[in-house]
Structures are given as C-alpha cells and as structure tokens.
Image: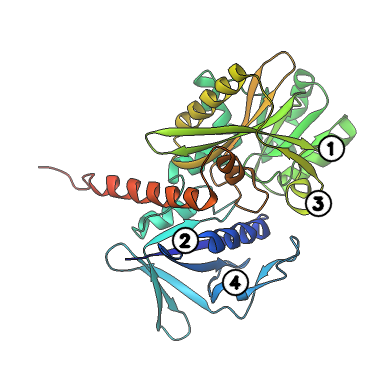
Amino acid sequence: MKKKIGILFGGKSGEHEVSIQSALNIFEALDRDKYVPFLIGVDKEGNFRFLSGSSHIVNRDDPKRIAISDEAPIVQPIKGENSTLCFFYNESGSFVEEVDFVFPIIHGNSGEDGCLQGFLKWLEVPFAGASILGSSIGMDKDVAKRLLKEAGVEVCKFFAFSKGECERGEYLKFVDKLGYPIFVKPASTGSSLGISKVKNQQELQRAVERALSFDKKVILEEAVIGRELECAVLGNDEVLASCLGEIIPKHEFYSYDAKYVDPDGAELIAPAELPAEIEEKMKEIAVKTFKVLECEGMARVDFFLTKDGKIFVNEINTLPGFTKISMYPRLWQISGISYNELLDKLIELGFQRYENEKKLKTTAEF
C-alpha cells in the first residue's frame, strides 16, 4: 500500500522562499509507485495551507518572489488514528486528508531548530531528519561549536554574546584576539542570513546590529583563509558520509544571494579534488560531528581546509536544501545514491526511528 507523504514547507523565517524550492523538488521526485505526496505549506503568517499540487505555488521561476498562493485553503493539523497526521478545513471543520509520514523541509527558525520536530513528535507522526535535540543543537552555532570543542573537533576561534552584552559593547574587548577580518553571525540562522564579513571597526557595529535583527545572540568568528568544503551525512545508528564538494564563492563570501538568488554566485565542484587521506579524514570528522551533535537522518557538515592541511568544522546543517543546485542531494548522487533513492532512504530512516521510539517505556514501574 502506498504511503501518504506530507511535505511540510514554507514557514515564517527568512528562508521561506528556499524552502518552497526544496519542497517542489521533493514533491516532483517522490516515486508515485510507492508514495502519494501532498504539499502542506506554512505561509509567512504561520497558517497551514493544503495545496492542490504545485499549482498553488506562484512565481515559481523567481527565487525572490516564489510564494504560496492565498487561494490554497487554510487547514488545521491534528493527531489522527494509527499515527497519522490529519488535516481539517478551519472554516468548516470538514476532513481534508491524512498522511502517514511528514517530510519537514521548513528551513530556519521554527522549522529546523526543534520546534517543528517537537510538534510532530507530540502528534506521534513519523518524520524525516533530526529529532528535537539534534535539531536544536545544530541550529545554535554557539552551542554546537562548544560541544565540538569538548569532543576534540577543531572549530574556528569564536566568541558568543547575548543581545544585552552586545548593546553594552562587551564584544569589543575580544576583537583584538580575533583580528580583522571578522565574521559577525546570528547564532541561530541558516542560509547565511544576517551574516557580515567586516574588515574594520567602522563596519563592526553595523554588522552586530544587523545580526541582532535576526537573533538575540551573536557570534564573532575569525575569518579562516582556506577552501570551503561540504560533506553529506546519512543514517541513524549506522552513518554514511558522501564524497566532498567544494564551494568557490564569487561574492565576498558564500552569502544568501550567492546560494539562492545569483545563479553565478558560486562555483560548486563535486567531487572536490582532494588527496585521498585528507578526504577520508574529513569524512571521519563529518560522521563524528553528526554523532556528537545528536543528529539523525541527514545533515550537511561544512568545513574549512587551510593550505597547511588544518581542518576546521564551520557548522552543521540538519535540514539541508533540496533545490536543484543544493549540495546535499548532489553529493549523494555523485556518491552513488540517486535523488529518488535518497528520499526513500530518509523516509525509511524516519520510520525506523519512530518504530524504535515506540518500543520505549513511557510509564513508571511500581
């Protein structure tokens, strides 16, 4: 019997448009002999909308204006029978559809930070990707870097500050320890949103204010000079790492526009040209990073590789993009797992975790 797959996308974060592109690719790629896919969009006001196929996506060819149509009906998600997620029309209360599995592809805040994963667990519906803990750790660059350092994984030198500390200028005393240029980052955004590369103190204050417009915590990070490399990771208990891919930005750095708006914003080289021993070491570090940060299902681990052979983990992305140019599915295709097979595997891993968690006791023994 075919599984009904709900592709949950959109959301209220700045990565809304990227999420729509990812969802459309997944919707079109899912094997119709195995699955019945449904598009469930979350608009920028937080309303769930049930789409009649891709016809309710407007401006599909414009990465800045792509959107969920207001004509898609608003629905309410509730817990169904036998671990299914049901949807009802809000205005009439009539039944719409039920799904057996959710593929969450809401990038950014409330989508890959554990909020959505907690909601899906509350509804007892299986879903793809990391669960609550791995999602929340992976989203917070400060917490993730501290855990990696504790585990002996090299990360760039950084300092994190709360909004209050930033407003009091307490970060200024650490600038000399980093040296210019410095990256200023919101601690918990994806797709390089709110990130600035600053070269002097005149640019620093403006960059901190920009980062604070996205998050209540800011990271100052040294600018490591090196190659930017990425590795795709897949699995639950048994974890696989793909070949490495290289990003060569044509902007100042690999910004949001370079990733998703400017078609010539970066050159993507996959597989990357690396000595075999360096590639194997990076794959080992990618798997270790995945496990240290309590990830499941999928993640993309981003690295810097310096000229003298030092490897730094930059960050992990627990809900990587699935657009036509996204590195995560591309690396797996080169490593021998097609886009369709990758989706099959992620659905299988989600069901596997769900079944394992069902076996755990939830009541006290007396």
| Dot 2 amino acid type | Asp
How far apart in space, not on screen, are marks 1 and 2 (Cα)?
A: 40 Å
Q: Element type at marker 3?
A: loop
| Dot 4 amino acid type | Ser
Q: Residue at point 62% right, 61% down? A: 20
Decide: marks 3, 2 in contact (CB < 8 A)? Answer: no
Q: Residue at point 19% right, 48% down? A: 363
Q: Nearer the viewer, mark 3 or mark 2?
A: 2
Q: Is 273 rendered above or below residue 300?
A: above
Q: Element type at marker 1?
A: loop
State which tag comes first along the sequence, 3 or 1: 1
Residue 295 image offset from top left, x and y in percent? 46, 38
The numbered disc on residue 31 is: 2
Give the class, few, some or many, for how many residues have Cα within 10 Å of label 1's Cα (few <14, many ≥20). few
Judging by the rendered image, the residue that carries numbered circle 4 is 54
State which tag comes first along the sequence, 2 or 4: 2
Give the quadrant of residue 291. top left
Judging by the rendered image, the residue that carries numbered circle 3 is 262
State which tag comes first along the sequence, 3 or 2: 2
| Dot 1 amino acid type | Glu
Give the class, few, some or many, for how many residues have Cα within 10 Å of label 2's Cα (few <14, many ≥20). some
Decide: marks 1, 2 in contact (CB < 8 A)? Answer: no
Residue 243 image offset from top left, x and y in percent? 58, 32
How far apart in space, not on screen, are marks 4 and 3 (Cα)?
A: 24 Å
Q: Nearer the viewer, mark 1 or mark 4?
A: 4
Q: Residue at point 13% right, 42% down? A: 365
